[in-house]
Amino acid sequence: MKNFYLILSCCALFSLTAHSENFSGDDFNGAWESDGGNQKVQPVGWHALSCNASGVFGSMKGGTVTKGGDESDASPIIENIFAGSKGSWMTTGYVIPGILSLGTPWIYVDTNYFTAAKGDLGVDGGVEFTGRPSKITFKAQYYNAPTSDIDDAAHIKVYLWKGSAESTDISGANHTDEMSAVLAGNAGATLIGSEN
């Protein structure tokens, strides 16, 4: 089993106050579904990164989420994956992190270059609620990457905000409540809680 890189805009085992919206994805024992991008499966209510891109220097695939455990104790296995091409004398590409979020993960890949500096990545939105959660708990297990060519960083991010932020990615596409814009406190959004 490879390592995982985990971003959850709000985490598993999520309990809201009585006057808040109900969140049905508070464990992973319920239904799982295809994410529509041929990236295996994800628990209902959660969103995996989906990426299939081909270009001059190889191909990329992201959204490496699989179902682990059993029906009474299911869990997502989230893996980083190297994307690009490897030759005997040159390697072109970079590691695409596996992401599972209550928001919508997105990725921009410049297929002419296949370098991280020419790409962009983020998460839009999350679960709307009317009151602060009374409790947020989660558990995670980390596995070291079996090879040296995979970045084995793992992160869990939880953040709450009010308002809304508009932003633009490196390709010029517009986003609403994108993770980095909210965390940076862009005009319109006020961060009211976060944990890394």
Image (spheres, rainbow, N blue to C red):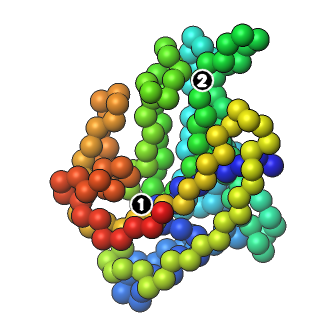
Label 1 sits on a secondary structure element that is loop
Find disc 1 in the rendering and name its residue: 126
Is 25 placed left or right of 22 in the picture?
Answer: right
Q: Where does the image place residue 28, in percent across and percent down from the top left? A: 66, 68
Q: Residue at x 46, y 22 (%)?
A: 110
Find disc 2 in the rendering and name its residue: 93
Residue sitting farthest toward the bottom: 18
- Up-down relation of residue 28 to residue 149 (above or below): below
Label 2 sits on a secondary structure element that is strand
Is 68 placed left or right of 33 in the picture?
Answer: right
- Up-down relation of residue 77 to residue 136 (above or below): above
Q: Residue at x 58, y 37 (%)?
A: 96
Query: What is the three-letter code of the residue carrying label 2?
Result: Gly
Is 141 placed left or right of 125 in the picture?
Answer: right
Q: Where does the image place residue 194, in percent across and percent down from the top left? A: 40, 67
Distance, label 1 to label 2, CA atoms, is: 30 Å
Q: Residue at x 60, y 73 (%)?
A: 138
